[in-house]
């Protein structure tokens, strides 16, 4: 496994592989890797000749500077995990390798501001207005900005993303389609701990007490799914809100039931071919998200 910090060095190696007819699979991450990320790498290894994993904590997708500072950075451990599954290349650039000072300054000036633009001519419609988009202004602009840069650098055949970030996956599919980027986007199932908690790089920041109550998130989503055939959407929502309200360490940000394709909120499951229940909450100081497909 080779670790590259510079764009040109990585590109040189990948161009050699491509000119030898090798296919490239790409797993973009912000590091602090867990079993969910490793599943993405394993899937890429199965479906491509060469796998590249990027590790880059992207400053432009954070609208909370303390969240950016606290984001775990564990490059050495991450590299060991990737080596163990025979990842071929790691791309771990510095911020200055990915962004010009003007781009960073523009983001700094508009840190809490929805009007910040990332220079892409992409219209996400409601995809970036609801749920995470409404609670984290500018977040998806930052995700689209960095993923489009990473796609231009790696130019993979396929790119792999976890379905835990359901809305992010929809945003990336939309961006790829609008910009006509010839990369197949592959969504992979959520990987959970044995008690149901969705794996996330943020889980390591939970205290023992918080970690002990965290399975309530999946328990709530599972209860909603179990009752989805019999209860109306309004009752499913009330049930979820009541379950989370029972736990004083949790502060619900939103619970939404949406069309799985458009992410528009729905009043009845009969309205959509496929529906998803999405949740975001604060557990102590840690913000967690999860989701489950209802149909
Ligand atoms: O899901 C993540 O880890 C990040 O949002 C991504 C896609 C790597 C972009 O920074």
Image (tube, rainbow, N blue to C red):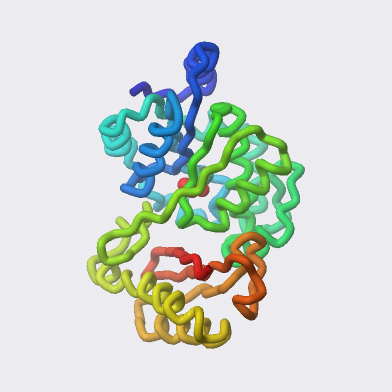
Q: Assign the N terminus to one quadrant of the image.
A: top left
Q: Is residue 175 above or below residue 99?
A: below
Determine which quarter of the picture holds residue 75. Answer: top left
In the figure, 105 relative to 126: above or below?
Answer: above
Question: Picture coordinates of residue 277 (x, y %)?
Answer: 52, 70
245, 24: nearer the viewer: 24
Residue visible at 29% across and 30% down?
Answer: 83
The answer to whether 240 appears left or right of 249 in the picture is right
Count of labels in the image: 0
Q: Residue at x 36, y 44 (%)?
A: 39
Say which of 229 and 82 sits in front. Answer: 229
Residue drawn where x is 29% and y is 73% of the image: 213
The picture places residue 130, in percent across and down from the top left corner, at 64, 66
Residue 67 x/y as whole percent? 45, 56
Whether residue 22 can be seen here: yes
Q: Residue furthest left?
A: 208
Residue 91 appears in the rendering: no
Identify the residue at image location x=62%, y=45%. Answer: 144
Q: Measured from the top left, where is residue 142 in percent x and y?
A: 60, 47
Depicted 273 relative to depicted 83: above or below = below
């Amino acid at each position: 496994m080779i670790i590259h910090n510079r764009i040109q060095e990585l590109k040189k190696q990948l161009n050699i592989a491509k000119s030898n007819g090798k296919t490239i699979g790409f797993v973009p991450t912000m590091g602090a890797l867990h079993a969910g990320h490793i599943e993405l790498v394993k899937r890429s290894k199965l479906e491509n000749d060469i796998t590249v994993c990027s590790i880059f904590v992207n400053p432009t997708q954070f609208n909370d500077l303390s969240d950016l500072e606290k984001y775990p950075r564990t490059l050495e451990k991450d590299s060991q995990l990737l080596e163990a599954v025979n990842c071929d290349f790691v791309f771990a650039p510095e911020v200055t390798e990915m962004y010009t000072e003007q781009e960073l300054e523009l983001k700094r000036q508009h840190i809490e501001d929805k009007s910040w633009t990332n220079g892409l001519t992409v219209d996400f419609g409601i995809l970036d207005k609801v749920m995470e988009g409404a609670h984290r202004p500018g977040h998806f602009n930052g995700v689209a900005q960095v993923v489009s840069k990473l796609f231009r650098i790696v130019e993979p055949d396929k790119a792999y993303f976890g379905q835990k970030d359901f809305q992010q996956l929809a945003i990336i599919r939309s961006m790829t389609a609008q910009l006509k980027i010839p990369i197949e986007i592959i969504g992979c199932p959520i990987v959970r701990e044995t008690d149901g908690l969705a794996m996330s790089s943020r889980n390591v920041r939970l205290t023992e007490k918080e970690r002990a109550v965290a399975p309530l998130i999946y328990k709530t989503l599972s209860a909603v799914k179990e009752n989805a055939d019999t209860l109306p959407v309004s009752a499913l929502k009330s049930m979820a809100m009541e379950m989370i309200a029972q736990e004083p360490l949790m502060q619900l940000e939103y619970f939404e039931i949406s069309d799985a394709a458009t992410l528009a909120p729905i009043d009845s499951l009969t309205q959509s071919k496929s529906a998803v229940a999405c949740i975001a909450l604060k557990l102590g100081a840690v913000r967690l998200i999860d989701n489950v497909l209802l149909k």
